[in-house]
Image (cartoon, helix red, strand yellow):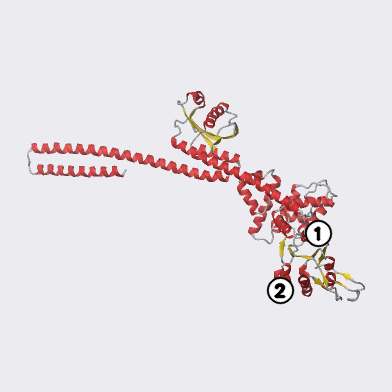
Amino acid sequence: MSEERQRFQKISGESTGVLSTGFMELSSLLRTGGAPADAVKKLDKLFAQVMDANRKLSGEATALFDAMDSLEQSLARMTEAKRQYEVLYASGILFTSETEMRALMEKAVTTVVKELQADEGFIVLSDEKGEIESVAACNMDPEAHPEAKEMSMSVIRATLSRSEPTSIVRGEDAAQQNSILRLGITAAMCVPLAAGRRVFGAVYIDRRNKERPFTDSDLIFLLSFARQIVRGFEISSEITTLEKKLVADTTMKFEDLRREFRCDGIIGSSRKLFDVLRVASRIAPTDAGVMLLGENGTGKDLLAHAIHANSRRAEGPFITINCGAIPNDLLESELFGYESGAFTGATKTKPGKIELADGGTLFLDEIAEMSVNLQAKLLRLLQNRELERLGGVQTRKIDVRVIVATNRNLPEMVIAGTFREDLFYRLKVIELTLPPLRDRREDIHELSRFFIRKYAGGKELPITAEAVAVLEGYHYPGNIRELDNIIQRAVVLMKGDTIDIPDLPPEIVESEQNAPVVFGGRSLEEAETEFRRLYIMRILRQAKSKSEAAQMLGINRTHFYKLLAQLGIDL
């Protein structure tokens, strides 16, 4: 348009100069009293110049206005193309994030009908034989309009069979004219959905009662849109395959672990428990010392026994001693044994727990309660593999594996001087931390079923979902041991045939209903995370599948599986 403007300005300037010179000459002639005949000639010449300038300017103005119209049309097309590109970009993100096939189809057909100002639309999927398997429609009920359905399906079948786009305009397709006229269709388009050489579906849209056919740019947009849908389907299929494989792999891994690592008394299938058992299965065959950490009631004694049962010492003895349950002045004789006459009351020789564990495993629970002096003797035992009974002089060789456990912070005790640093590092060859029950709430239901069978003589007494929800909401300061007691009480005191909320201790019910108690002592972020875990686990129990659970939560499956991983909820 700049060229037309420059030409117009040039001609306008030249015309203005010529006319100005002509008027000046005529004015001068009239002032000097020139002959009338000369004045008439000048006036005729000036009139001719005015007409010539007007003609030239009119032609250039027309060209300029045409250029402006063309520019406006180009801008409109560019604006429409930009808008369609933005729609394609947004739809690409939308479709690749939507992993539910049905939801993807419904979103896609709604979007394309809106963006191309169509009145109706279909997306269909077909099998390898070309038979229609699934349909998603927008602004139309196929069952209420069978003729419309048949007409659109005939166009779709033609597209599927030819594997190329189909476009219909009223008056151009004699085979479809009767249906088109009756249905008021002015234009229709259909493009295939293809992955490689395989056509597995189609997108169909039409316009009714609008005297505007679809344009070539509309067809290009629909083809690009179809490619976005295909990519969404491919990603949905890939995610579904990966999800199935992940679930199968996780299940197989846990089953394989249970077969390889015998731990019948340890109940649960949560990710945190799995991680602990996986490490335990690797170290069990060795003679490495193990330090088990965790709160009271988390099952440290069960894990110690499982490690022994899966070791080369499984046929040997497993000896347990709770260092916190025996006064320190008696603990030494319990551990190392004594000879007759070693102290008042020692009327006969007695071997200690360490000696009894020879060839097997010694489990020292609550090791942090052992006195510093006794810690020194234990260190010498671990270093030299020898011991002497109290009051004795004979040194005995001992072959024993030592597993220790504590709920205390040993590094802090080392700093405070209440636990020997050299012993700490001697014991801490392998360190395993058992998670508290509140961090593996997904195991509470399974644990509850186990304890119900335990106290109901092997019977499978039912428990309501509401009661399980209360149990899962409690914070369990006593961990699994406390849950054991709660279920025992419920089985004994239950009033009907099913364990329900009234059968649970009142303090448990009240605590579950009181969020500050349940989440007390935690930051806002930790409390929110715990609430999410608890809520999602409840939804998982209510839903028939993970897809349904994601739908109940109002999120797509990709986001749902990310949440499960972030919150440590086992698949």
Report the side of 268 relative to 134 (left or right).
right
Amino acid type of the residue tagged 2 in the rendering? Ala
Judge whether residue 480 can be spotted in this image: yes
Q: Residue at x 65, y 44 (%)?
A: 547
Q: Which of the numbered marks, if any, corresponds to residue 515?
A: none
Q: Secondary structure at mark 1?
A: loop
Which residue in the structure is indicated by mark 2? 416
Mark 1 vs mark 2: in front: 1
Quarter of the image that includes the N terminus: top left
| Mark 1: few/some/many CA within 10 Å (<14, 14-19, 20+) | some
* Drawn side of residue 99 relative to residue 392, left or right: left
* Amino acid, disc 1: Ala
**Residue 569 in the image, given as x and y percentages of width and height:** 68, 52
Give whichever of 179, 370 is nearer the camera: 370
The residue at 59%/43% (across/down) is 236
Q: Secondary structure at mark 2?
A: helix
Residue 376, compared with residue 272, is above or below; it is below
Q: Residue at x 56, y 26 (%)?
A: 147
Note whether 65 is above or below 446 in the view shown.
above
- Where in the figure is residue 88, as x and y percent of width and height? 49, 43
The residue that mark 1 highlights is: 314
Q: Earlier in the sequence, mark 1 or mark 2?
A: 1
Quarter where residue 415 is shown: bottom right
Residue density around tag 2, few if under 14, some if 14–19, many if 20 or more, within 10 Å: few
Q: Is residue 123 left or right of residue 42?
A: right
